[in-house]
Every structure is written in C-alpha cells, then in structure tokens.
Image: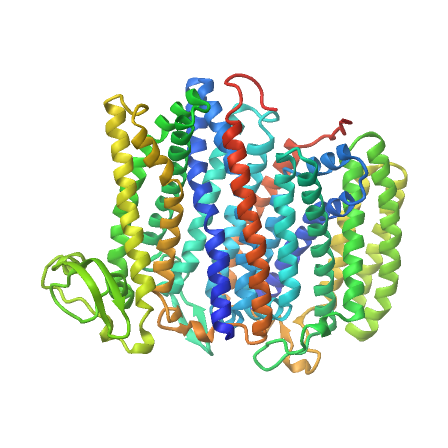
C-alpha cells in the first residue's frame, strides 16, 4: 500500500511536470505576445502553438483528475481553499483557449486586438497563480479537522506566495521565449532569444530572493534532496543561458525543460511525504499516507496509467514530428 | 441566499452551457469521419468539400466545449469539497481515465484535422478524423460512468464516512451506465445530424451555396432518421432501467402520486405540488404499468410512497422529461417527412419541409439539456442516490459571496462566448464552403 501511495505521489508529480513543461511554453508565448510589435509577429506566435496547446492543457486536466482519484482530500482542500484564485485561473484559461482559435477568424482590427489581449492576459494570469498556489502549499495552509481551509482569502496573498507566482511567471516567460527562438526564423527568432536572456535574469533574481525564504519558512532548514535538485537545476539553468547565447535554440529549449522538471522535483521532495502541510497543527497535515484512496483504486488507476501514458507519449511525439520545422513570419 | 442553492445554480449554469457543445462535436465528428471515408473510397471532391466545411463549423464549436470543460473538472473540488472527499475513491478514476484515454487522443488528432491536411498523407488525415470522433465518444463514456455511479452506485462500501471501491468493473458498469451511455451518445448524434440538416436547408432557402447545400442535406437524411429511431429505442430502455433502479425518479417523470396498478401514462398535466396532484391531466390508462412490468396490473410506486424529504421536485422533472419526449417525436416526424419527400424527389421544392428542418436546429440542443435536467433533478435530493444528500456535499470553506461572484463572472463570460460563437457560425455559414477542387489555405 505504501509503495502505491508513493508511486501515485510520483505519477501526479510527473503529470504536473509534464503540464509545466508543455503548457509552460505556450503560456510563455502568451506573455511575449503582449510585447510583439508587429501584427505578422503576433500571427506567427499563435501559429507556432496552434496545433499543440490543446493537448498541452490536457496534462492539467489529467493531473486534476488523477489528484481527485488518488488523493481526494487534497483535491477537495486545495481546490475549495483557493476558490477565488482558481476562478481567476479558469477565467484566464477560458479566454486564452478561445482567443487562440478565434483571433484569426475575423480580419477586423478591434476583433484581433481584443483576442490578442485576451490571449496575453489569459496566459499571464494562470502563470502567476499556479506559482502562488504552489507557494501557499509549500508554506502550509490553516486547516480544520475536516481538512477545510480556514485561513481566508487574503492570507493567500502573502509575500512568499506572491514571489513564487513571479518565479513561475518568469520561468514560463523564459521557456516561452526559448520556444519562440527555436520555432521561428530570422529577426523575430533573434528577438525572442534576447527576450529569453532578459527573462533568464529575472528568473534567477527572483529565485535567489525566494529561495532563502523557502528554506527558512517552509521546509525549516536545509534538506539534502531538495537542495540537490536545486543545485542541479542551477547547473541546468546556466546551460540554458549559455546555449541560448550561442544560438543553439533547440538545445536551450530542451535544457529549459530539464530546469523546470528539476525545480518541480525540488518542490515535491521538500514536501514529501506531506502534500498539504497544515500551518496551524502539523497533525492535521494531508500526507501521502493519510489522504490517499484505497488500495484497489490506486491499483486500478495504476493499470490505467500504465496502459494510457505510453499512448499519450506516443501522440505527443507524433504530433510534434508532424508539425516540426520552423514557422516563417510573413510581413504584410 | 444560501451556499447550497448558489452552488447548485453555478453547477447548473456551467454544465448547462458546457453541454451545448460536446453533443454537437460528437455528432459532427462522426459525420466528418463519414465524409472523409466516402472521399477516401470514391475520390469525389464533393465529399472532401463537405468534410472541410463541417470541420470548420466543428472547430468553432469544439473550442468553446474545451474552454468550458475545464470549469467542470475544477468544480467538484472548488464547490463540492465534501462530495469530493466522500466519493473521490470512486468518482476521480473515471475523470482521470477520461483525460488519459480520451482527451489526449482527441486533442492530438484534432491538431492534425484542423492544421495538418497539407502535412500528412490522405490516409493519416482520414485516420485523424476517426480518432477525433472516437476520442469524443470515449470521453462521453467516462463522464457517463462517473454520473451513472451517482445515480445507481455499485461496487463500493462505506468505510469511515467515505465510499470505498470494492469492485472496479461493478462500479464502472453499474446499472445505469450502458443505458445512459447509449442514450447520451445517440442523443449527441441527433444534435450533430440535425444541425447539418437544418443549416443545409437554410442555405437552400436563402439561395446560398445551393449545390453544396443540396448534397449536404441529402447526406444526412438517412442518418437523421436512423439516429432518432435509435435514440428513442435506447431511451425507452433507459427509462425502463430508471423504473427498476430509481422509482422515485420514475414517479416524478410520470407525475404519479399514488402507488397503483394500471398506472396511467400522463400525456399532459400541470403538477400541483401543494395538493400533491396533477391538474389538467390527460392520461392513457395502464401504459406505465405495462412499460414497467409488461402487464397492466403491475404495481408502480407513486411519490407518496416516499418520505417528503426524499422526493425529487416534481414540476421540473416532469416537464423536462415530457418536453424531451415530445421533441424526440418531432425529430422523428421531420426526418420521416424528409425521407418521404426525397424518395418522391420533391425535397428541394418543399419550402415547408426546408423551414421545418431549419427551425429544428436549436431543438435537439434543448432536448439534450432537458434530458439531463430530468436525470439530475430527478435524482434529487441525493447527490449520490441513497447515500449522500446534495445539501451535505458542498464546500464548507467557501463563503456564499464568493460563489455568487463566480456565478456573475461565469454568466458574463458565457454570454460573451455564446454571442461570439453564434456570430462565427453565421459568418462561416454565409461564407460557405471553399471551392470544390484544390488545396486548403
């Protein structure tokens, strides 16, 4: 049973990492969409993510479903506790989804402008809020005996969590810029590469600010495993910078995927075996052991995952192969 | 207002809006696959033109379904935390399976269907259209599994205040899963097919893209008749299952107060909940008894057999069920007339039929919504039939004000999306199909 519980902690971790890496790049593209000056650039940005973003978002839906199935109390506590934040995430995700598909349907300036803004705001909002949510979970929530969050909305807007939100945003901005540098051609690709450098500095700066906070307040002292992941992440992230400067955009993007994964692993290992720490009383914390579904459910779900996930990887690789190659920016 | 009512309004609003789109895309998805298959077989570019045009309509609609679907997945946790804790051991798995088996498949191949015609071989393109339809239909399966377990729970026991899975297959194939699934999917096909039928008829009436519209209309005449007959047949079966598993719901469907033999079928009536009877009732004696037990003297339970706190609201359940039923008959009539006129070679001259078909376009959407209303309101006051009451299922930590705020937010966004969706459908309708031959842009 314990093994199953740990496996499911890892599998949900993998789903969240998959989401961060994959939707991370199209959320990041949404951020830079705001800064693109030319109409042709913006069209190319949308074009570069069009066939992929929907599949990327399915990682979030699947992670949500898997969390519900494997650790129902965690799903219930986090989703009801962060109610307003999640409503804003939904607002963002709904608008950006529709924006991507509808923007090019009508060639009328106000129409295009509206969906451009919807796409950017709808990308920035979730990018920020996912980080805020992770920050709050790391810090711990005030819970009652049933597991309901009792801290109120404004307690979620603490400096640490907000900083984590900015870390998340800068991470996705970096990732998205690297994706654009890889996927586009010519001057725009150069511009995206410069954006990536800027985002890189912002990311490192924010991370350096938030890290001591996290060690002191959240995990109460230096722990070896999370620290090892953080160190690896810093190495990987340095490579990202170097590769980007050298113009090796594909390698830079792939290394950025590693960076994201390592950062998420650091978070996961800092929490384990707790999933949601109770800040008021550690005994109320939701852990891998006290919050899981039954052995039968975890086993059935594992079989579903073992059949399904290889298929998912196959589709993902297949679709990226079909739509491989660069996108040309056509000046109008 | 109290939080339970607000949470219910929010759920009704978000699921009601969301459910406009999945049935349409399931129905259109299979028609697109049919057109692609015919194109593969015959090489006739007319089929490709049909596939391309309806794929465009599909894309405009699909995206709203995706966007509003995310809300649904979050909502169990945000608004129904107590429910989520109680049923998570069983209810979460189908949602996760839906993601793993259906959404990934559908979204990946949809990318090819919408943006990849030039990048893949015709075979792969055809295959993608199949996978999109299969993905959508599988997604319906898992969500129906989850819902059916709420209606007719099985394969579980209650341990320490939560439902624990004891038999996976018994939970998946509980008493109502298959009848509901076939009724839901066939109902979805009705939406898609009548959408094509009606809009094609409207094109002919407006003298737009006439050649294309005639081919399009003819292509769905047989499917429309077939799917409505199947829907009614499986609907009958589903109703029988309800009579066996959820007698209180059946009594509300039929507006049956007293337990009786020779229970009548109510053709019309206005429920008078205060005096617990039907006003202005038009009855056919004995038919419900015949339906439930095969004999006129079968005893059928009436609502008064149930404690007042265990009865579903009668009026809403009764009206939504009856209206759905009558709409079904209307669809059968429209498609039957269509077939007869086609056979007599007069279909394009009959403006009356064309108008009937055109005005029918919104009705299958409504019938689908009504079917779900009958199913879900008829399940009340339970969120899990017999095990957990809706009033005990909500998130205790969410203040009513926040729910109200999010209801307002969703109402605004969804009104905007609805308007934009109709606008884009009209635009595509007016623009019509591309040229018969040639590459996609």
A11 or B6, nearer to the observer: B6
Q: Residue at x 43, y 59 (%)?
A: B146
Residue B69 falls left or right of residue A241: left
Residue B131 x %, y %? 49, 37
- Can residue A228 be seen by looking at this rendering? yes
Q: Quadrant of residue B156?
A: bottom left
Question: Which quarter of the image is occupied by the C terminus of chain A?
Answer: top right
Q: Which of the image's four quarters has the N terminus of chain A?
A: bottom right
* Residue A178, image quadrant: top right
Q: Residue at x 84, y 55 (%)?
A: A203
Count of labels in the image: 0
| Residue A302 drawn above or below residue A322 | below
The residue drawn where x is 72% and y is 51% is: A121
Judge whether A96 appears above or below A326 on screen: below
Q: Is residue A265 left or right of residue B152?
A: right
Whether residue B187 is situated above or below residue A279 in the rendered picture: above
Q: Residue at x 76, y 48 (%)?
A: A31
Residue A254 appears in view: no
- Could you say which is closer to the camera, residue B188 or residue B117? B188
In the rendering, at what x and y percent does residue B433 appear?
51, 25
Residue A135 image offset from top left, x and y in percent: 74, 66
């Amino acid at each position: 049973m314990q093994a199953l519980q740990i496996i499911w902690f890892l599998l949900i971790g993998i789903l969240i990492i998959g989401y961060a890496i994959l939707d991370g790049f199209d959320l990041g593209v949404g951020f830079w969409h705001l800064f693109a000056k030319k109409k042709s650039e913006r069209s190319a940005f949308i074009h570069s993510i069009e066939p992929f973003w929907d599949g990327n978002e399915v990682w979030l839906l699947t992670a949500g479903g898997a969390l519900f199935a494997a650790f129902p109390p965690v799903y219930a506590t986090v989703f009801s506790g962060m109610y307003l934040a999640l409503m804003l995430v939904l607002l963002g995700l709904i608008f950006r989804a529709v924006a991507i598909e509808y923007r090019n349907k009508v060639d009328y300036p106000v129409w295009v402008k509206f969906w451009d803004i919807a796409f950017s705001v709808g990308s920035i909002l979730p990018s920020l809020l996912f980080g805020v949510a992770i920050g709050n979970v790391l810090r711990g929530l005030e819970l009652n005996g049933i597991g309901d969050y009792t801290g109120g909305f404004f307690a979620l807007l603490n400096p640490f969590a907000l900083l984590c939100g900015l870390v998340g945003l800068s991470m996705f901005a970096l990732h998205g810029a690297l994706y654009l540098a890889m996927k586009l051609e010519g001057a725009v690709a150069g511009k995206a590469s410069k954006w990536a450098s800027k985002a890189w500095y912002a990311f490192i700066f924010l991370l350096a600010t938030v890290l001591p906070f996290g060690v002191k307040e959240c995990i109460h002292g230096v722990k070896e495993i999370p620290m090892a992941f953080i160190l690896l992440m810093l190495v990987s992230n340095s490579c990202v910078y170097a590769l980007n400067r050298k113009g090796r955009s594909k390698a830079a993007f792939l290394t950025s995927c590693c960076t994201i994964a390592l950062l998420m692993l650091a978070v996961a290992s800092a929490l384990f075996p707790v999933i949601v720490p109770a800040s008021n009383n550690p005994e109320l914390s939701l852990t891998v052991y006290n919050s899981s579904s039954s052995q039968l459910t975890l086993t059935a779900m594992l079989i579903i995952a073992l059949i399904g996930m290889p298929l998912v990887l196959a589709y993902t690789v297949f679709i990226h192969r079909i739509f491989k190659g660069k996108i040309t920016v056509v000046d109008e | 207002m109290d939080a339970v009512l607000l949470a219910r309004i929010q759920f009704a609003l978000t699921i009601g809006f969301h459910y406009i789109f999945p049935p349409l895309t399931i129905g259109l998805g299979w028609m697109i696959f049919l057109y692609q298959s015919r194109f593969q077989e015959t090489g006739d570019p007319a089929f490709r033109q049909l596939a391309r045009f309806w794929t465009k309509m599909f894309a405009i609609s699909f995206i709203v379904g995706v966007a509003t679907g995310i809300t649904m997945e979050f909502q169990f946790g945000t608004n129904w935390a107590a429910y989520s804790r109680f049923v998570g051991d069983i209810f979460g798995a189908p949602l996760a399976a839906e993601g793993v088996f259906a959404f990934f498949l559908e979204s990946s191949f949809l990318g090819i269907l919408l943006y990849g015609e030039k990048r893949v071989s015709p075979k792969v393109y055809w295959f993608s259209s199949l996978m999109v339809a299969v993905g959508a239909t599988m997604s319906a399966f898992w969500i129906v599994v989850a819902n059916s377990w709420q209606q007719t729970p099985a394969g579980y026991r209650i341990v320490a205040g939560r439902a624990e899975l004891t038999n996976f297959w018994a939970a998946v194939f509980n008493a109502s899963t298959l009848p509901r699934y076939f009724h839901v999917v066939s109902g979805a096909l009705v939406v898609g097919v009548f959408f094509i039928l009606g809009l094609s008829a409207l094109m002919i009436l407006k003298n737009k893209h006439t050649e294309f519209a005639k081919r399009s209309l003819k292509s769905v005449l047989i499917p429309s008749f077939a799917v409505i007959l199947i829907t009614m047949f499986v609907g009958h079966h589903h109703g029988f299952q309800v009579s066996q598993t959820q007698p209180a719901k059946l009594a509300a469907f039929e507006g049956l107060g007293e337990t009786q033999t020779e229970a009548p079928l109510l053709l019309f009536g206005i429920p008078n909940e205060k005096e617990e009877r039907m006003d202005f009732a038009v009855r056919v004696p004995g038919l419900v008894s015949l339906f439930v037990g095969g004999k006129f003297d079968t005893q059928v339970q009436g609502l008064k057999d149930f404690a007042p706190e265990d009865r579903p609201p009668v009026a809403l359940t009764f009206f939504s069920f009856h209206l759905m039923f009558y709409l079904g008959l209307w669809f059968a009539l429209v498609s039957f007339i269509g077939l007869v006129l086609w056979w007599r070679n007069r279909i394009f001259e009959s403006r009356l039929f064309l108008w009937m078909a055109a005005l029918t376009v919104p009705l299958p959407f409504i019938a689908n919504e009504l079917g779900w209303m009958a199913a879900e309101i008829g399940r009340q006051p339970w969120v899990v039939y017999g095990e957990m009451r809706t009033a005990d299922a909500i998130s205790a930590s969410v203040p009513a004000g926040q729910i109200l705020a999010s209801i307002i937010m969703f109402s605004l966004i969804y009104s905007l999306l609805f308007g934009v969706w109709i606008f884009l459908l009209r635009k595509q309708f007016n623009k019509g199909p591309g040229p018969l031959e040639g590459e996609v842009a």
